[in-house]
Image (tube, rainbow, N blue to C red):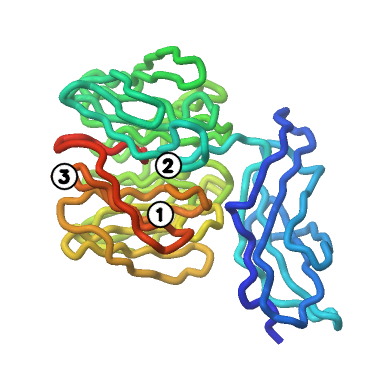
Amino acid sequence: MELFRSSRIGVAALLFGLSTGVAQAGTLTLAWDATSDPTVSGYILYWGNQSGSYPSSLNVGNTTSRQLSGLTDGMPYYFIVRAYNAQGTLSGPSIEVSRRVGIPMSTLGDFNGDQRSDIGVFRPSTGTWYTSAGTTVWGSATDTPVTSDYDGDGRMDVAVFRPSTGIWYILLSGSQAGASYSWGGAGDIPVPGDYDGDGKADLAVFRPSTGTWYVLQSASHTGLTYTWGGAGDVPVVGDYDGDGRSDIAVFRPSTGIWYILRSNLLQGTSVTWGGVGDIPVQGDFDGDGKTDVAVFRPSTGTWYTLRSSTQSGGAYAWGGNGDIPLATDFDGDGRTDIAVFRPSTGAWYILNSNTGTGSSFAFGSPGDIPVSER
């Protein structure tokens, strides 16, 4: 019989050990929801380094959390849990969740390090950033904000990409030191992400004219190139395979097809989700540690999400034409929240995933660019 009705591993409860050395033993604490089935007498935790393969297991008894030790720092791990009854009958598996052990994680838009995305804007007219970390003048009217965690301290760094010169200007939150790098050129689209899995954002650009990605890895300071996509495609960086590294991906508005190059196996996949006029808003809406495919349809103000854990779709009416969709974790529960910024009024409308309730804030002015996501 099916014992596992509501149990799932809660990614928001995943905690990292303090070990930082590569190839040393690391620890990870996992927690999951208890099943409502009264016949359940315990749980078995399964894990491994590849999605869908779990060679290790541990009977944790009738408890809903466990700290695992002896894990290798820097390696990705995938977890599921199954319930069992007194006769030893196992339930089906929970959703799979994943984490790279021992690597610092940051939340998009989190400038103060509390694991929640902050409300913040960049004002091109003055080059001023307004965030929870304060007011900072950094950039100019033609610069593109490229918020990310470049120093690996768990906080977003103020940063801009200057398309006219291909120069990145980064103000590191850890040291408050400024740095500049030349990477890219006119017509390139900046696509920062943690492509090497070291917990620091890497400089990267997508060149639509050739469909080429240029990635500068922070760990080795070496450059890599990939041909993936073409003119008219929209880059949609995310960790779709849950291995702790950013995957190269594009959304093709003309067909509504997503083309994803998974970093764990360097294999390409495609998903049809969305259409002409839709805006891609990828994020981890189900909290399983993997990026979900999603779009925002301005004409109707509807969000369409495809959950990676269940391959089921959802639709949410939130926002309208002219709003800027924002997909990040404002409530700190480990799941991406649905939100929009309304440039005409400077208002933020957030649908919190932990409570299902909405909230609104006035922060910003017409012409401001929200910096709560990259």
In the rendered image, is residue 233 in sight? no
Earlier along the polypeptide chain: callout 2 or callout 3? 2
**Residue 12 horizontal side relative to residue 161, left or right:** right
x and y percentages locating residue 89 in the rendered image: 80, 81
* Gap in angstroms between the C-alphas marked 3 and 1: 21 Å
- Residue beneath label 2, please? 117
Compared to 328, does 4 lie above or below?
below
Residue type indicated by callout 3? Thr
The amino acid beneath tag 1 is: Asp
Q: Quadrant of residue 161?
A: top left
Q: Residue at x 23, y 25 (%)?
A: 143
The tag earlier along the polypeptide, 1 or 2, is 2
Res. 226 visible in picture: yes
Judge by depth and name the residue closer to the eye, 285 or 242.
285
Above or below for 355 versus 190? below
**Label 2, label 3: how many angstroms apart (C-alpha)?**
21 Å
Q: Which residue is mark 3?
A: 345
Q: Nearer the viewer, residue 247 or 367?
A: 367
Disc on res. 337: 1
Disc 2 versus disc 3: nearer the observer: 3
The residue carrying pointer 3 sits among few (fewer than 14), some (14 to 19) or many (20 or more) residues within 10 Å by Cα, namely few
Q: Quadrant of residue 91?
A: bottom right
Q: x%, y% of residue 246?
A: 48, 42
Which residue is painted at 39% across and 62% down in the image? 357
**Split into 4 quadrants, where in the image is the C terminus?**
top left
The reply to whether callout 1 and callout 2 are in contact (CB within 8 Å) is: yes
User: Helix, strand, or loop for circle 1?
Assistant: strand
Q: Residues within 10 Å of mark 1 (few under 14, many from 20)?
A: many
Disc 3 is placed on an element classified as loop
Q: Which of the image's four quarters has the N terminus?
A: bottom right
Q: From the viewer's perspective, is residue 357 above or below residue 83?
A: above
Q: Amino acid at mark 2?
A: Ser
